[in-house]
Image: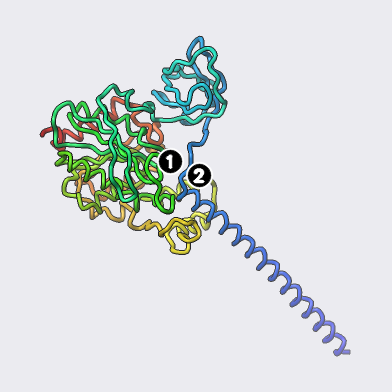
Amino acid sequence: MNAPRRAAGSRASRRTTTGLGIALSALSVTLAASAAALGAVSLRVARTVVRPAGRRPDTRIVRLDAAAQTITLARTPDTSLPGRYGLFTVGSADYLRLGSIVGSDESTVTRKLLTHVPADGDLAAEAAFSGWYFDKPEQLHLPVEEVDIDTPVGACPAWLFPAASATDVWVVQVHGRGTTRAEALRAVPVFHDLGITSLVVSYRNDGDAPRSASGTYALGATEWRDLDAAIGYARRHGAKRVILMGWSMGGALSLQAALESPHAEVIAGLVLESPVVDWRTVLSFQGRMMRLPLPVITLAQSTIASNWGAAVLRSGEPIPLDRLDGVARAAELRHPTLILHSDDDGFVPSDASHALAAARPDLVTMETFTVARHTKLWNYDEMRWTAAIRDWVRAQDLTRD
């Protein structure tokens, strides 16, 4: 009587074991597929970070009123900001300057046009909102020269705005990721009024300067050498004290130059506008904004910083995220620094800026904005922005020859 029960039990055990094996195999396949999917997404994120990309539309032109000289845009956190801005377009104009908001509703914002658009003007619907405002140096109505800076990748074009009278104080302006040197034009007038010569520079892979061998961004790890060449240019042309002003990724370049440059003794200070102080903070924030799982964000960072990642991304060399961490290297900072950052930046979070200010209160002055968003502090509150820079420069005794 017991033998049939043992046989039945054995068959049931085999069925359970077989079922468990099938389940585990299916789980392994699922996990492998999930890992592959996560890896693919991580690689795509890493590739996006290091590859220069053109300007992308971020709003739509809903209506153009040539008679009233107004333009109505789809509402976004940027298009609804008060102040003066720019708009990249396609059609009868490629760039428009925009003034104050004259009307709005839940889905649109209407702004005054400060660039005249004729009645027969025809613009594509897709557009890109910009904080540049000035897109050409002649719009500043200041003397300007086109010069070339000899860098490790070749001649990088720059705009030189000489001070009204001879001075040994220069500011070298460096733009951010995915933009060009026109981004920095807004800062030229405040330094000109202080009697300081401005050198507005380009760097490898930005569309104005030569391409590097890889054609990819190193997030400041190599680009700072082009900025360093600009400091050398300034020294050869009479500069004895050089302020570095970096916008967004230009802030990362400026910090690297301050920490690594053989010209460090002439660097008189840093002005950082919406700066990248630590790339991991930025990449993690962007990943959360895209609702990416933490493993994807972590793997993307590892890819960027690894030898195998450099091979897959064709970026030439791993990007040393540790060396680009300004907070971790705060003890090495030797120069007075002014940071201008909006706490609702929306692209480069201000956390690392605050952390650097907290780590080096002896050197770092933090001017915190709200509402102003990323690199749009001048546009949002020009008077406060200008006063912050002017007062800091004077406090460093940088207006005297």
If you read the primary sequence from the N terminus, does the residue marked by circle 2 or circle 1 appear first?
Answer: 1
Q: Residue furthest left?
A: 401
- Residue occupying image coordinates x 36% and y 27%: 136
Q: Position of residue 229 (x, y in %)?
A: 26, 47
Q: Residues within 10 Å of mark 1 (few under 14, many from 20)?
A: some
Q: Amino acid at mark 1?
A: Gly
40 up-or-down from 78: above or below: below
Q: Position of residue 41 (x, y in %)?
A: 56, 54
Q: CA distance from mark 2 to mark 1?
A: 19 Å
Label for residue 178? 1
Label for residue 366? none
Q: Position of residue 251 (x, y in %)?
A: 32, 44
- 320 and 19: which is toward the camera: 320
SS at mark 1? loop
SS at mark 2? helix
- 146 and 171: which is toward the camera: 146
Which tag is nearer the camera, tag 2 or tag 1? 1
Which residue carries the number 2 mark?
A: 289
- Residue occupying image coordinates x 33% and y 34%: 184
Q: Amino acid at mark 2?
A: Met
Which quadrant does the C terminus fall into?
Answer: top left
Colouring convention used in this rendered image of the protein: rainbow
Relative horizontal placement of residue 114, taking residue 174 as reference (left or right): right
Relative horizontal placement of residue 377, taking residue 214 as reference (left or right): left
Q: Residues within 10 Å of mark 2 (few under 14, many from 20)?
A: few
